[in-house]
Amino acid sequence: TIIRPQRIIIIWILIDTPQLQYFITMMFLPFSFLLFGVSQASNSPPSLSSRIPAFIDNTEPIEDCLEMAKEYHRKAIQSAMDSYYFSSAFSSSNEEEINDIIMKTHTLHVPSKNWRLPDLNSELKPEIKVTHGAGGGDDSSTPLFTAEECQALIDAAEAHFSGREWTTLPSGSFDVAGSWIKNIPAVHDWFNRMVQHRLFPLLAREFPEFCSANELVVDNSYIFKYTPETGRRTGIHTDSGCLSFTIAVGGDYEGGGTWMDGYDEGTVTMKQGHVTIRPGGIRHCGQAVTKGTRYIIGGFCMHRNKVEHCRMLINMGNDLLGQRQAKKARKVLEAAIRINPNFDGSYSHLAEAYEQLGLDPIPVLEHCYHHVNPRNSEIAYTLGMKYMKKDRTEDAIECFTVCLELDPHDVESMMSLAQITENNEQWYARILATPGAAPLVVASACSQLGALWGNRDDTAKEIEYYQKGLRALGPNSDNYELRYSLACSYASSEDNDKAIEAFQRALQLIDSNHTNYVPTLQNLYRVAFKQIRQLHPKGFASQEDMIDALKQIMGNDNYQRLAASNKK
Protein backbone atom coordinates (compact mmCIF):
# COMPACT_ATOMS: atom_id res chain seq x y z
CA THR A 1 0.00 0.00 0.00
CA ILE A 2 1.31 3.44 -0.95
CA ILE A 3 1.03 5.84 2.01
CA ARG A 4 0.37 9.33 0.62
CA PRO A 5 1.94 12.42 2.29
CA GLN A 6 -1.42 13.62 3.64
CA ARG A 7 -1.96 10.26 5.36
CA ILE A 8 1.50 10.38 6.93
CA ILE A 9 0.69 13.72 8.52
CA ILE A 10 -2.65 12.43 9.81
CA ILE A 11 -0.99 9.32 11.26
CA TRP A 12 1.63 11.47 12.99
CA ILE A 13 -1.03 13.70 14.56
CA LEU A 14 -3.14 10.79 15.75
CA ILE A 15 -0.21 9.17 17.48
CA ASP A 16 0.12 10.99 20.80
CA THR A 17 3.10 8.99 22.09
CA PRO A 18 6.30 11.04 21.58
CA GLN A 19 8.42 7.93 21.14
CA LEU A 20 6.16 6.64 18.32
CA GLN A 21 6.03 10.09 16.71
CA TYR A 22 9.82 10.14 16.67
CA PHE A 23 9.93 6.62 15.20
CA ILE A 24 7.49 7.52 12.39
CA THR A 25 9.39 10.72 11.61
CA MET A 26 12.76 8.97 11.41
CA MET A 27 11.32 6.16 9.29
CA PHE A 28 10.01 8.45 6.53
CA LEU A 29 12.57 11.25 6.67
CA PRO A 30 15.10 9.59 4.31
CA PHE A 31 12.36 9.21 1.67
CA SER A 32 10.69 12.59 2.08
CA PHE A 33 12.33 13.99 -1.04
CA LEU A 34 10.49 11.34 -3.07
CA LEU A 35 7.16 12.34 -1.58
CA PHE A 36 7.40 16.10 -1.46
CA GLY A 37 10.14 16.83 -4.04
CA VAL A 38 13.28 18.88 -3.61
CA SER A 39 13.24 22.56 -4.56
CA GLN A 40 16.33 24.11 -6.05
CA ALA A 41 17.17 27.64 -7.12
CA SER A 42 17.07 27.54 -10.90
CA ASN A 43 20.35 29.41 -11.27
CA SER A 44 22.30 27.24 -8.82
CA PRO A 45 24.54 24.36 -9.95
CA PRO A 46 22.52 21.18 -10.60
CA SER A 47 22.92 18.10 -8.46
CA LEU A 48 25.09 15.36 -9.93
CA SER A 49 23.20 12.32 -11.10
CA SER A 50 24.02 8.87 -9.73
CA ARG A 51 23.46 7.17 -13.11
CA ILE A 52 26.90 7.94 -14.55
CA PRO A 53 28.21 5.68 -17.38
CA ALA A 54 30.99 3.32 -16.33
CA PHE A 55 33.54 4.88 -18.71
CA ILE A 56 33.41 8.22 -16.83
CA ASP A 57 35.35 8.88 -13.64
CA ASN A 58 32.68 10.01 -11.18
CA THR A 59 35.16 11.00 -8.47
CA GLU A 60 36.86 13.87 -10.29
CA PRO A 61 35.79 17.28 -8.92
CA ILE A 62 33.86 19.36 -11.44
CA GLU A 63 33.36 22.61 -9.55
CA ASP A 64 35.74 24.35 -11.97
CA CYS A 65 33.62 23.13 -14.89
CA LEU A 66 30.49 24.55 -13.28
CA GLU A 67 32.24 27.88 -12.86
CA MET A 68 33.36 27.77 -16.49
CA ALA A 69 29.75 27.12 -17.51
CA LYS A 70 28.61 30.20 -15.58
CA GLU A 71 31.27 32.34 -17.25
CA TYR A 72 30.40 30.94 -20.68
CA HIS A 73 26.75 31.75 -19.98
CA ARG A 74 27.63 35.30 -18.93
CA LYS A 75 29.58 35.90 -22.12
CA ALA A 76 26.83 34.35 -24.24
CA ILE A 77 24.25 36.66 -22.66
CA GLN A 78 26.44 39.69 -23.27
CA SER A 79 27.00 38.69 -26.89
CA ALA A 80 23.28 38.17 -27.37
CA MET A 81 22.49 41.59 -25.94
CA ASP A 82 25.13 43.18 -28.20
CA SER A 83 23.73 41.49 -31.31
CA TYR A 84 20.00 41.73 -30.63
CA TYR A 85 18.68 44.86 -28.97
CA PHE A 86 17.44 44.27 -25.45
CA SER A 87 15.22 46.45 -23.29
CA SER A 88 13.61 45.69 -19.97
CA ALA A 89 10.77 48.12 -20.68
CA PHE A 90 7.98 45.63 -21.32
CA SER A 91 4.63 47.29 -20.77
CA SER A 92 1.09 45.97 -20.70
CA SER A 93 0.69 47.26 -24.25
CA ASN A 94 3.21 44.64 -25.37
CA GLU A 95 1.03 41.93 -23.89
CA GLU A 96 -2.06 43.33 -25.61
CA GLU A 97 -0.48 42.59 -28.98
CA ILE A 98 -0.64 38.84 -28.28
CA ASN A 99 -4.05 38.66 -26.59
CA ASP A 100 -5.66 37.13 -29.69
CA ILE A 101 -2.90 34.56 -30.21
CA ILE A 102 -4.08 31.07 -29.23
CA MET A 103 -1.53 28.27 -28.96
CA LYS A 104 -2.06 24.54 -28.85
CA THR A 105 0.31 22.37 -26.80
CA HIS A 106 1.45 18.98 -28.11
CA THR A 107 3.20 16.64 -25.66
CA LEU A 108 6.00 14.72 -27.35
CA HIS A 109 6.82 11.04 -26.92
CA VAL A 110 10.28 10.94 -25.36
CA PRO A 111 12.77 8.57 -27.01
CA SER A 112 13.31 6.51 -23.85
CA LYS A 113 12.20 6.42 -20.23
CA ASN A 114 15.57 7.85 -19.21
CA TRP A 115 15.78 10.74 -21.67
CA ARG A 116 15.71 14.34 -20.41
CA LEU A 117 16.14 17.84 -21.80
CA PRO A 118 19.68 19.18 -21.25
CA ASP A 119 18.78 21.66 -18.48
CA LEU A 120 15.96 23.12 -16.40
CA ASN A 121 13.86 19.95 -16.53
CA SER A 122 11.75 21.04 -13.56
CA GLU A 123 10.55 24.06 -15.57
CA LEU A 124 10.55 22.92 -19.21
CA LYS A 125 8.84 19.87 -20.66
CA PRO A 126 9.25 17.89 -23.91
CA GLU A 127 6.44 19.61 -25.76
CA ILE A 128 5.83 21.98 -28.64
CA LYS A 129 3.38 24.86 -28.80
CA VAL A 130 1.90 25.87 -32.14
CA THR A 131 -0.38 28.78 -32.91
CA HIS A 132 -3.93 27.48 -33.29
CA GLY A 133 -4.82 26.67 -36.86
CA ALA A 134 -1.20 26.52 -37.96
CA GLY A 135 -1.54 22.90 -38.98
CA GLY A 136 -4.20 23.61 -41.54
CA GLY A 137 -7.31 23.76 -39.39
CA ASP A 138 -8.87 27.09 -38.50
CA ASP A 139 -8.28 29.67 -41.23
CA SER A 140 -9.72 32.40 -39.01
CA SER A 141 -7.11 31.91 -36.27
CA THR A 142 -4.86 34.89 -35.59
CA PRO A 143 -1.24 34.55 -36.73
CA LEU A 144 1.58 36.21 -34.82
CA PHE A 145 2.42 38.29 -37.92
CA THR A 146 0.21 39.59 -40.71
CA ALA A 147 0.64 38.67 -44.37
CA GLU A 148 1.71 42.25 -45.08
CA GLU A 149 4.43 42.09 -42.42
CA CYS A 150 5.72 38.78 -43.76
CA GLN A 151 5.83 40.04 -47.34
CA ALA A 152 7.67 43.19 -46.28
CA LEU A 153 10.17 40.96 -44.49
CA ILE A 154 10.70 38.82 -47.61
CA ASP A 155 11.11 41.95 -49.75
CA ALA A 156 13.70 43.37 -47.34
CA ALA A 157 15.73 40.15 -47.33
CA GLU A 158 15.62 39.82 -51.11
CA ALA A 159 16.61 43.47 -51.52
CA HIS A 160 19.62 42.86 -49.29
CA PHE A 161 20.84 40.11 -51.62
CA SER A 162 19.78 41.86 -54.82
CA GLY A 163 22.16 41.15 -57.67
CA ARG A 164 24.00 38.34 -55.86
CA GLU A 165 23.37 34.89 -54.49
CA TRP A 166 22.16 34.40 -50.94
CA THR A 167 24.78 33.35 -48.46
CA THR A 168 24.46 29.83 -47.04
CA LEU A 169 24.37 28.43 -43.52
CA PRO A 170 25.44 24.84 -42.81
CA SER A 171 23.04 22.37 -41.18
CA GLY A 172 24.55 18.93 -40.83
CA SER A 173 25.45 17.71 -44.31
CA PHE A 174 23.26 20.37 -45.91
CA ASP A 175 23.87 23.98 -46.87
CA VAL A 176 20.76 26.17 -46.87
CA ALA A 177 20.46 29.62 -48.40
CA GLY A 178 20.12 31.98 -45.47
CA SER A 179 21.71 34.55 -43.21
CA TRP A 180 21.96 35.51 -39.57
CA ILE A 181 19.36 38.21 -39.07
CA LYS A 182 21.89 40.53 -37.43
CA ASN A 183 23.66 40.71 -40.81
CA ILE A 184 20.61 42.08 -42.69
CA PRO A 185 20.02 45.61 -41.29
CA ALA A 186 16.41 46.11 -42.41
CA VAL A 187 15.33 42.69 -41.17
CA HIS A 188 17.37 43.15 -37.98
CA ASP A 189 15.55 46.37 -37.08
CA TRP A 190 12.15 44.78 -37.62
CA PHE A 191 13.17 41.66 -35.70
CA ASN A 192 14.31 43.62 -32.64
CA ARG A 193 10.94 45.37 -32.39
CA MET A 194 9.06 42.12 -32.96
CA VAL A 195 11.02 40.34 -30.21
CA GLN A 196 10.08 42.92 -27.59
CA HIS A 197 6.47 43.48 -28.58
CA ARG A 198 5.36 39.95 -29.44
CA LEU A 199 7.81 37.07 -29.16
CA PHE A 200 9.08 37.56 -25.60
CA PRO A 201 5.61 38.36 -24.19
CA LEU A 202 4.29 35.23 -25.95
CA LEU A 203 7.07 33.04 -24.52
CA ALA A 204 6.51 34.47 -21.05
CA ARG A 205 2.79 33.80 -21.31
CA GLU A 206 3.29 30.21 -22.48
CA PHE A 207 6.09 29.40 -20.01
CA PRO A 208 5.07 31.45 -16.94
CA GLU A 209 6.97 29.28 -14.44
CA PHE A 210 10.16 29.63 -16.44
CA CYS A 211 10.50 33.27 -17.41
CA SER A 212 9.13 36.76 -17.64
CA ALA A 213 9.46 38.74 -20.85
CA ASN A 214 12.32 40.92 -19.63
CA GLU A 215 14.41 37.89 -18.55
CA LEU A 216 14.89 36.58 -22.10
CA VAL A 217 17.48 37.35 -24.76
CA VAL A 218 17.84 36.07 -28.32
CA ASP A 219 21.03 34.04 -28.54
CA ASN A 220 20.87 34.11 -32.33
CA SER A 221 18.35 34.10 -35.15
CA TYR A 222 18.42 33.40 -38.87
CA ILE A 223 16.28 33.58 -41.99
CA PHE A 224 16.27 30.56 -44.33
CA LYS A 225 15.27 30.46 -47.96
CA TYR A 226 14.46 26.87 -48.88
CA THR A 227 14.35 25.97 -52.58
CA PRO A 228 15.20 22.75 -54.45
CA GLU A 229 18.28 24.55 -55.79
CA THR A 230 19.55 26.55 -52.79
CA GLY A 231 19.10 23.94 -50.07
CA ARG A 232 16.00 21.89 -49.64
CA ARG A 233 16.27 20.87 -45.99
CA THR A 234 18.35 20.76 -42.81
CA GLY A 235 19.87 17.88 -40.90
CA ILE A 236 18.28 16.57 -37.70
CA HIS A 237 19.64 18.60 -34.79
CA THR A 238 18.95 20.35 -31.50
CA ASP A 239 19.14 24.11 -31.01
CA SER A 240 21.55 26.30 -29.11
CA GLY A 241 19.12 27.74 -26.58
CA CYS A 242 16.72 26.78 -23.81
CA LEU A 243 13.75 27.96 -25.92
CA SER A 244 13.49 27.96 -29.72
CA PHE A 245 11.04 29.38 -32.22
CA THR A 246 10.18 28.89 -35.89
CA ILE A 247 8.15 31.51 -37.78
CA ALA A 248 6.52 30.70 -41.13
CA VAL A 249 7.33 33.81 -43.17
CA GLY A 250 5.73 32.49 -46.33
CA GLY A 251 6.39 31.66 -49.95
CA ASP A 252 4.75 29.53 -52.62
CA TYR A 253 6.08 26.00 -52.25
CA GLU A 254 5.37 22.29 -51.97
CA GLY A 255 6.76 20.05 -49.21
CA GLY A 256 8.55 21.70 -46.31
CA GLY A 257 7.46 21.87 -42.69
CA THR A 258 9.41 21.01 -39.53
CA TRP A 259 9.79 17.40 -38.41
CA MET A 260 9.70 17.06 -34.61
CA ASP A 261 10.97 13.95 -32.83
CA GLY A 262 8.16 12.39 -30.83
CA TYR A 263 5.38 14.46 -32.46
CA ASP A 264 2.36 12.29 -33.32
CA GLU A 265 1.88 13.87 -36.74
CA GLY A 266 5.60 13.88 -37.50
CA THR A 267 5.83 17.21 -39.31
CA VAL A 268 4.50 20.59 -38.19
CA THR A 269 3.15 22.66 -41.07
CA MET A 270 2.24 26.30 -40.60
CA LYS A 271 0.43 28.98 -42.53
CA GLN A 272 2.06 32.33 -43.13
CA GLY A 273 2.67 34.33 -39.97
CA HIS A 274 2.23 31.44 -37.56
CA VAL A 275 4.83 30.27 -35.05
CA THR A 276 6.05 27.16 -33.22
CA ILE A 277 7.86 27.43 -29.87
CA ARG A 278 9.57 24.63 -27.95
CA PRO A 279 12.52 23.76 -25.69
CA GLY A 280 15.75 23.86 -27.66
CA GLY A 281 16.71 20.31 -26.72
CA ILE A 282 14.01 18.77 -28.96
CA ARG A 283 15.49 17.09 -32.04
CA HIS A 284 14.02 18.37 -35.29
CA CYS A 285 14.77 19.23 -38.92
CA GLY A 286 13.44 21.32 -41.79
CA GLN A 287 11.81 19.02 -44.34
CA ALA A 288 12.66 19.12 -48.03
CA VAL A 289 11.00 21.67 -50.29
CA THR A 290 10.26 19.88 -53.56
CA LYS A 291 8.98 22.89 -55.48
CA GLY A 292 8.94 26.67 -55.06
CA THR A 293 10.42 28.79 -52.27
CA ARG A 294 9.83 28.67 -48.51
CA TYR A 295 10.98 31.42 -46.14
CA ILE A 296 11.24 30.89 -42.39
CA ILE A 297 12.77 32.63 -39.41
CA GLY A 298 14.21 30.53 -36.63
CA GLY A 299 16.05 31.38 -33.49
CA PHE A 300 17.14 30.48 -29.98
CA CYS A 301 16.50 32.24 -26.68
CA MET A 302 18.36 32.20 -23.38
CA HIS A 303 17.31 33.12 -19.86
CA ARG A 304 19.46 35.93 -18.52
CA ASN A 305 19.65 34.53 -14.99
CA LYS A 306 19.29 30.76 -15.33
CA VAL A 307 22.49 29.02 -16.32
CA GLU A 308 22.14 26.06 -18.66
CA HIS A 309 25.11 24.19 -17.21
CA CYS A 310 24.87 21.12 -19.41
CA ARG A 311 24.41 22.99 -22.67
CA MET A 312 27.11 25.53 -21.85
CA LEU A 313 29.59 22.69 -21.25
CA ILE A 314 28.54 20.96 -24.47
CA ASN A 315 29.13 24.19 -26.41
CA MET A 316 32.50 24.64 -24.71
CA GLY A 317 33.47 21.07 -25.54
CA ASN A 318 32.51 21.53 -29.17
CA ASP A 319 34.59 24.72 -29.37
CA LEU A 320 37.59 22.93 -27.83
CA LEU A 321 37.27 20.05 -30.30
CA GLY A 322 37.42 22.56 -33.14
CA GLN A 323 40.67 23.81 -31.63
CA ARG A 324 41.97 20.21 -31.38
CA GLN A 325 42.14 20.49 -27.58
CA ALA A 326 40.68 17.05 -27.04
CA LYS A 327 41.88 16.58 -23.45
CA LYS A 328 40.14 19.75 -22.24
CA ALA A 329 37.09 18.91 -24.35
CA ARG A 330 36.86 15.48 -22.75
CA LYS A 331 36.90 17.02 -19.27
CA VAL A 332 34.03 19.47 -19.86
CA LEU A 333 31.96 16.97 -21.87
CA GLU A 334 32.28 14.30 -19.17
CA ALA A 335 31.23 16.98 -16.66
CA ALA A 336 28.16 17.67 -18.80
CA ILE A 337 27.27 13.98 -18.72
CA ARG A 338 27.78 13.80 -14.96
CA ILE A 339 25.36 16.71 -14.57
CA ASN A 340 22.82 15.14 -16.91
CA PRO A 341 23.64 11.64 -18.20
CA ASN A 342 20.16 11.37 -19.71
CA PHE A 343 20.53 14.02 -22.40
CA ASP A 344 22.01 12.60 -25.59
CA GLY A 345 23.62 15.80 -26.89
CA SER A 346 26.92 15.31 -25.03
CA TYR A 347 27.77 11.84 -26.24
CA SER A 348 28.56 12.43 -29.90
CA HIS A 349 31.01 15.20 -28.98
CA LEU A 350 32.62 13.04 -26.28
CA ALA A 351 33.02 10.23 -28.82
CA GLU A 352 34.85 12.68 -31.10
CA ALA A 353 37.09 13.71 -28.19
CA TYR A 354 37.91 10.05 -27.56
CA GLU A 355 38.87 9.60 -31.22
CA GLN A 356 41.14 12.64 -31.15
CA LEU A 357 42.81 11.16 -28.08
CA GLY A 358 43.24 7.75 -29.72
CA LEU A 359 40.63 6.10 -27.48
CA ASP A 360 37.83 3.77 -28.56
CA PRO A 361 34.59 5.82 -28.94
CA ILE A 362 32.30 2.79 -29.27
CA PRO A 363 31.48 2.45 -25.52
CA VAL A 364 30.39 6.11 -25.46
CA LEU A 365 28.19 5.69 -28.54
CA GLU A 366 26.75 2.37 -27.36
CA HIS A 367 25.79 3.75 -23.96
CA CYS A 368 23.87 6.61 -25.54
CA TYR A 369 22.26 4.34 -28.15
CA HIS A 370 21.14 1.65 -25.69
CA HIS A 371 20.42 3.64 -22.52
CA VAL A 372 19.70 7.28 -23.38
CA ASN A 373 18.27 7.86 -26.85
CA PRO A 374 17.90 4.99 -29.33
CA ARG A 375 16.36 7.52 -31.74
CA ASN A 376 19.39 9.79 -32.03
CA SER A 377 20.25 9.37 -35.71
CA GLU A 378 23.65 11.05 -35.33
CA ILE A 379 24.68 8.52 -32.67
CA ALA A 380 23.17 5.59 -34.61
CA TYR A 381 24.90 6.58 -37.85
CA THR A 382 28.30 7.13 -36.24
CA LEU A 383 28.01 3.84 -34.38
CA GLY A 384 26.99 2.09 -37.59
CA MET A 385 30.10 3.41 -39.35
CA LYS A 386 32.28 2.13 -36.49
CA TYR A 387 30.63 -1.28 -36.73
CA MET A 388 31.26 -1.33 -40.50
CA LYS A 389 35.00 -0.85 -39.94
CA LYS A 390 34.99 -3.76 -37.50
CA ASP A 391 33.00 -5.98 -39.91
CA ARG A 392 30.08 -6.10 -37.49
CA THR A 393 27.72 -6.02 -40.45
CA GLU A 394 24.47 -7.00 -38.72
CA ASP A 395 24.97 -4.38 -36.00
CA ALA A 396 25.76 -1.76 -38.63
CA ILE A 397 22.63 -2.63 -40.62
CA GLU A 398 20.54 -2.23 -37.46
CA CYS A 399 21.97 1.25 -36.83
CA PHE A 400 21.45 2.46 -40.39
CA THR A 401 17.93 1.03 -40.40
CA VAL A 402 17.13 3.06 -37.27
CA CYS A 403 18.40 6.17 -39.06
CA LEU A 404 16.06 5.54 -41.99
CA GLU A 405 13.09 4.86 -39.71
CA LEU A 406 13.64 8.30 -38.22
CA ASP A 407 14.43 10.02 -41.51
CA PRO A 408 13.41 8.19 -44.71
CA HIS A 409 15.48 10.79 -46.61
CA ASP A 410 18.77 9.92 -44.86
CA VAL A 411 20.86 9.28 -47.97
CA GLU A 412 24.11 8.83 -46.01
CA SER A 413 22.58 5.76 -44.32
CA MET A 414 21.32 4.52 -47.70
CA MET A 415 24.84 4.83 -49.11
CA SER A 416 26.24 2.86 -46.17
CA LEU A 417 23.62 0.13 -46.59
CA ALA A 418 24.48 -0.04 -50.29
CA GLN A 419 28.06 -0.87 -49.34
CA ILE A 420 27.23 -3.72 -46.97
CA THR A 421 24.10 -5.31 -48.48
CA GLU A 422 23.62 -7.30 -51.66
CA ASN A 423 20.88 -5.11 -53.14
CA ASN A 424 23.16 -2.09 -53.52
CA GLU A 425 21.66 -0.98 -56.83
CA GLN A 426 18.29 -0.55 -55.10
CA TRP A 427 19.83 1.75 -52.50
CA TYR A 428 21.63 3.85 -55.11
CA ALA A 429 18.40 4.27 -57.05
CA ARG A 430 16.58 5.25 -53.85
CA ILE A 431 19.18 7.93 -53.19
CA LEU A 432 18.53 9.47 -56.62
CA ALA A 433 14.78 9.48 -55.92
CA THR A 434 15.16 11.20 -52.52
CA PRO A 435 14.18 14.87 -52.36
CA GLY A 436 16.73 17.11 -50.68
CA ALA A 437 19.59 14.61 -51.05
CA ALA A 438 23.03 16.13 -50.53
CA PRO A 439 24.70 16.70 -53.94
CA LEU A 440 27.89 14.85 -52.99
CA VAL A 441 25.92 11.76 -51.99
CA VAL A 442 23.88 11.89 -55.21
CA ALA A 443 27.09 12.22 -57.21
CA SER A 444 28.60 9.24 -55.38
CA ALA A 445 25.50 7.12 -56.04
CA CYS A 446 25.63 8.06 -59.73
CA SER A 447 29.30 7.09 -59.85
CA GLN A 448 28.48 3.65 -58.40
CA LEU A 449 25.56 3.14 -60.78
CA GLY A 450 27.74 4.14 -63.70
CA ALA A 451 30.31 1.54 -62.69
CA LEU A 452 27.58 -1.12 -62.40
CA TRP A 453 26.36 -0.41 -65.93
CA GLY A 454 29.94 -0.35 -67.19
CA ASN A 455 30.46 -3.85 -65.81
CA ARG A 456 27.39 -4.86 -67.84
CA ASP A 457 29.00 -3.42 -70.99
CA ASP A 458 26.24 -0.84 -71.35
CA THR A 459 28.41 2.20 -72.06
CA ALA A 460 25.47 4.47 -72.88
CA LYS A 461 23.94 3.91 -69.43
CA GLU A 462 27.35 4.23 -67.82
CA ILE A 463 27.92 7.63 -69.42
CA GLU A 464 24.37 8.73 -68.53
CA TYR A 465 24.96 8.19 -64.80
CA TYR A 466 28.37 9.84 -64.77
CA GLN A 467 26.86 12.89 -66.46
CA LYS A 468 23.98 12.89 -64.01
CA GLY A 469 26.41 12.83 -61.10
CA LEU A 470 28.29 15.84 -62.44
CA ARG A 471 25.03 17.74 -62.93
CA ALA A 472 24.07 16.99 -59.32
CA LEU A 473 27.20 18.81 -58.13
CA GLY A 474 26.06 22.00 -59.84
CA PRO A 475 27.80 24.34 -62.28
CA ASN A 476 30.35 25.56 -59.73
CA SER A 477 31.61 22.16 -58.61
CA ASP A 478 33.40 19.22 -60.21
CA ASN A 479 34.74 15.83 -59.18
CA TYR A 480 37.86 14.02 -60.35
CA GLU A 481 36.51 10.47 -59.96
CA LEU A 482 33.37 11.20 -61.96
CA ARG A 483 35.23 13.17 -64.61
CA TYR A 484 37.91 10.48 -64.99
CA SER A 485 35.32 7.69 -65.16
CA LEU A 486 33.39 9.64 -67.78
CA ALA A 487 36.57 10.08 -69.84
CA CYS A 488 37.25 6.34 -69.72
CA SER A 489 33.69 5.62 -70.83
CA TYR A 490 33.99 8.00 -73.76
CA ALA A 491 37.28 6.34 -74.71
CA SER A 492 35.65 2.89 -74.60
CA SER A 493 32.91 4.09 -76.92
CA GLU A 494 35.51 5.57 -79.33
CA ASP A 495 34.28 9.13 -78.70
CA ASN A 496 37.81 10.47 -78.62
CA ASP A 497 37.01 14.19 -78.68
CA LYS A 498 34.86 13.97 -75.54
CA ALA A 499 37.33 11.58 -73.88
CA ILE A 500 40.21 14.00 -74.43
CA GLU A 501 38.22 16.93 -73.03
CA ALA A 502 37.15 14.90 -69.97
CA PHE A 503 40.71 13.69 -69.26
CA GLN A 504 42.00 17.27 -69.53
CA ARG A 505 39.37 18.51 -67.07
CA ALA A 506 40.10 15.62 -64.71
CA LEU A 507 43.77 16.62 -64.64
CA GLN A 508 42.79 20.14 -63.60
CA LEU A 509 41.07 18.72 -60.50
CA ILE A 510 44.07 16.97 -58.92
CA ASP A 511 47.58 17.98 -57.93
CA SER A 512 50.57 16.75 -59.91
CA ASN A 513 51.63 14.74 -56.84
CA HIS A 514 48.34 12.80 -56.83
CA THR A 515 48.85 9.05 -57.35
CA ASN A 516 46.45 9.09 -60.32
CA TYR A 517 48.00 12.10 -62.02
CA VAL A 518 50.48 10.23 -64.24
CA PRO A 519 48.03 7.38 -65.10
CA THR A 520 45.53 10.04 -66.19
CA LEU A 521 48.20 11.67 -68.37
CA GLN A 522 48.99 8.27 -69.87
CA ASN A 523 45.33 7.63 -70.70
CA LEU A 524 45.07 11.09 -72.25
CA TYR A 525 48.15 10.25 -74.38
CA ARG A 526 46.63 6.94 -75.56
CA VAL A 527 43.38 8.58 -76.66
CA ALA A 528 45.25 11.49 -78.27
CA PHE A 529 47.47 9.03 -80.18
CA LYS A 530 44.39 7.19 -81.45
CA GLN A 531 42.93 10.53 -82.46
CA ILE A 532 45.95 11.62 -84.54
CA ARG A 533 46.05 8.24 -86.28
CA GLN A 534 42.43 8.76 -87.35
CA LEU A 535 43.10 12.34 -88.41
CA HIS A 536 46.35 11.45 -90.21
CA PRO A 537 45.88 7.95 -91.64
CA LYS A 538 48.93 8.38 -93.92
CA GLY A 539 51.20 9.23 -90.99
CA PHE A 540 53.59 12.15 -90.58
CA ALA A 541 56.58 13.35 -92.51
CA SER A 542 58.67 13.36 -89.34
CA GLN A 543 58.57 12.45 -85.66
CA GLU A 544 58.62 16.15 -84.82
CA ASP A 545 55.38 16.66 -86.77
CA MET A 546 53.73 13.83 -84.85
CA ILE A 547 54.87 15.26 -81.51
CA ASP A 548 53.51 18.69 -82.47
CA ALA A 549 50.16 17.07 -83.27
CA LEU A 550 50.13 15.28 -79.91
CA LYS A 551 50.96 18.52 -78.11
CA GLN A 552 48.13 20.27 -79.88
CA ILE A 553 45.60 17.62 -78.86
CA MET A 554 46.88 16.86 -75.34
CA GLY A 555 47.90 20.40 -74.50
CA ASN A 556 51.58 21.33 -74.44
CA ASP A 557 51.78 21.39 -70.62
CA ASN A 558 50.25 17.92 -70.32
CA TYR A 559 52.63 16.52 -72.93
CA GLN A 560 55.66 18.03 -71.20
CA ARG A 561 54.58 16.66 -67.80
CA LEU A 562 54.14 13.20 -69.28
CA ALA A 563 57.53 13.38 -70.94
CA ALA A 564 59.13 14.48 -67.65
CA SER A 565 57.46 11.59 -65.77
CA ASN A 566 58.86 9.08 -68.26
CA LYS A 567 62.38 10.29 -67.52
CA LYS A 568 62.05 9.61 -63.77
Image: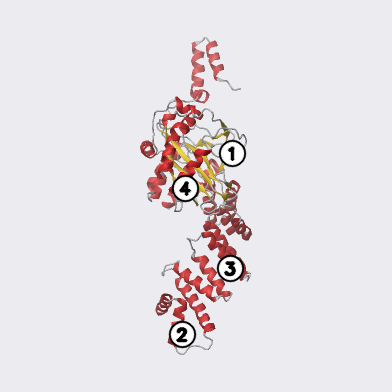
User: Badges 2 and 1: C-beta atoms under 8 Å apart?
Assistant: no
Residue type of the residue flagged with mark 3: Ile
| Residue 131 picture quarter | top right
How is the structure coloured here? secondary structure
Q: Which residue is mark 1?
A: 263
For the residues labelled 2 and 3, the Cα–Cα distance comes to: 31 Å
| Residue at 52%, 26% in the rendered image | 34
Q: Residue furthest bottom?
A: 541
Vertically, is 445 above or below 517?
Answer: above
Q: Is residue 549 visible?
A: yes
Nearest the viewer among 521 and 227 is 227
Instruction: Determine the secondary structure under disc 3.
Output: helix
Q: Earlier in the sequence, mark 4 or mark 2?
A: 4
Nearest the viewer among 511 and 163 is 163
Q: Earlier in the sequence, mark 2 or mark 1?
A: 1
Residue type of the residue flagged with mark 4: Glu
Q: Is residue 54 visible?
A: no
Q: Quadrant of the N terminus?
A: top right
User: Badges 1 and 4: C-beta atoms under 8 Å apart?
Assistant: no
Q: Earlier in the sequence, mark 1 or mark 3?
A: 1
Q: Which residue is mark 3?
A: 463
Vertically, is 312 above or below 292?
Answer: above
Instruction: Determine the secondary structure under disc 1.
Output: loop
Q: Position of residue 117 (x, y in %)?
A: 50, 36
Residue 437 as seen in the image, left or right of residue 514:
right
Q: Mark 2 or mark 1: which is in front?
A: 2
Residue type of the residue flagged with mark 2: Met
Q: Position of residue 538 (x, y in %)?
A: 52, 89
The 10 Å Cα crowd at callout 3, few under 14, some 14 to 19, many 20 or more, is many
Determine which of the numbered discs, if any, sits on residue 158 in the image. Answer: 4
| Residue at 45%, 89% in the rendered image | 542
